[in-house]
Image (cartoon, rainbow, N blue to C red):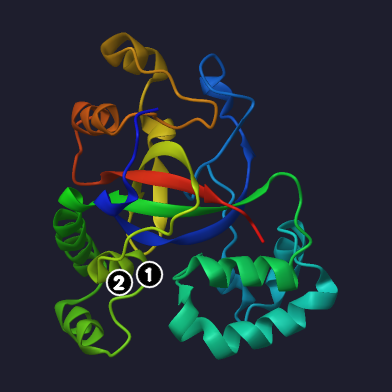
């Protein structure tokens, strides 16, 4: 792993999650369990599931480590803080908020973690522009313009990247993951990149977390896979969970 200067990266939020099992079709080159921020391969807590109108999410929240006895209190906290503290749909704007949430409401396990997600500054303008374009494809022009005029728009990672804040110090750099983003993190490179071909082309093996060690290699894989605008190389940094 090359030395990483966190000042070169823009924070995209902080996330509570758990290790997941490697995809079955990638067994040869991935560890038994991996860390992913993607919706398809990862196990990131969807904080928005605490919305009081989603009572059917109770079992999901319990599996994620929120005791049923804590869920009502957590929902009250969510209702009070979601506009200023929650990076919809599944993140926190500040590391301290994520740690406070885990400490107050969760029964954390050995496989739980908090990670910060960062984007190299050279990609931040491209990400914001591409995300606005992608978002516009899913809503009418009038609705899109109205959303952009709201006080709390943009939201989530888009909002954080625009703020140009650096990731918090004190974390442990894990590597890079190529992931799509629309209104939340979507598909991982693990779904679309052939690991055998990646190794042959770049001599780049996934590390012990299932991530790519090197920014330059992650960028080359992004270009090589042929749809640059969809995937960005996100830096993943692990922090103490409480």
Q: Which residue is mark 1?
A: 156
Placement of the N terminus among the 4 image quadrants? top left
Could you tell me which residue is drawn at 21 percent across and 82 percent down? 148
**8 lies left or right of 78:** left
**149 lies left or right of 36:** left
Could you tell me which residue is drawn at 51 percent across and 65 percent down? 95
Residue 134 falls in image quadrant: bottom left
Placement of the C terminus among the 4 image quadrants? bottom right
Label placed on residue 101 = none
Q: Position of residue 190 (x, y in %)?
A: 43, 32
Residue 133 falls in image quadrant: bottom left
Q: Position of residue 62 (x, y in %)?
A: 77, 63
**207 lies left or right of 144:** right
Q: Position of residue 69 (x, y in %)?
A: 85, 76
SS label for mark 1: helix
Q: Where 47 falls versus 174 (above or below)?
A: below
Label placed on residue 159 = 2
Could you tell me which residue is drawn at 53 percent across and 48 percent down? 238
Kindly check if marks 1 and 2 are in contact, taking CB atoms under 8 A apart as contact: yes
């Amino acid at each position: 792993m090359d030395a990483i200067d966190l000042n070169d990266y823009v924070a995209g939020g902080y996330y509570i999650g758990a290790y997941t099992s490697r995809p079955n079709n990638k067994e040869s080159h991935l560890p038994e369990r991996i860390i992913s921020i993607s919706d398809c391969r990862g196990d990131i807590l969807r904080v928005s599931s605490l919305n009081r109108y989603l009572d059917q999410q109770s079992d999901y929240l319990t599996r994620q480590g929120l005791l049923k006895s804590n869920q009502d209190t957590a929902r009250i906290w969510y209702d009070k803080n979601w506009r200023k503290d929650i990076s919809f749909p599944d993140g926190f704007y500040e590391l301290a908020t994520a740690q406070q949430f885990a400490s107050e409401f969760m029964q954390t396990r050995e496989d739980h973690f908090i990670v910060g997600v960062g984007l190299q500054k050279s990609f931040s303008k491209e990400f914001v522009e591409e995300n606005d374009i992608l978002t516009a494809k899913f809503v009418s022009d009038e609705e899109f313009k109205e959303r952009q005029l709201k006080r709390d728009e943009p939201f989530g990672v888009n909002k954080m990247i625009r703020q140009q804040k650096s990731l918090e110090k004190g974390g442990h750099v894990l590597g890079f993951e190529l992931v799509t983003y629309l209104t939340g993190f979507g598909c991982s490179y693990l779904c679309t990149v052939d690991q055998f071909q990646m190794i042959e082309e770049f001599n780049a093996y996934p590390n012990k977390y299932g991530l790519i060690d090197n920014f330059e290699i992650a960028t080359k894989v992004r270009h090589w896979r042929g749809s640059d605008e969809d995937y960005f190389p996100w830096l993943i940094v692990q922090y103490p969970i409480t």
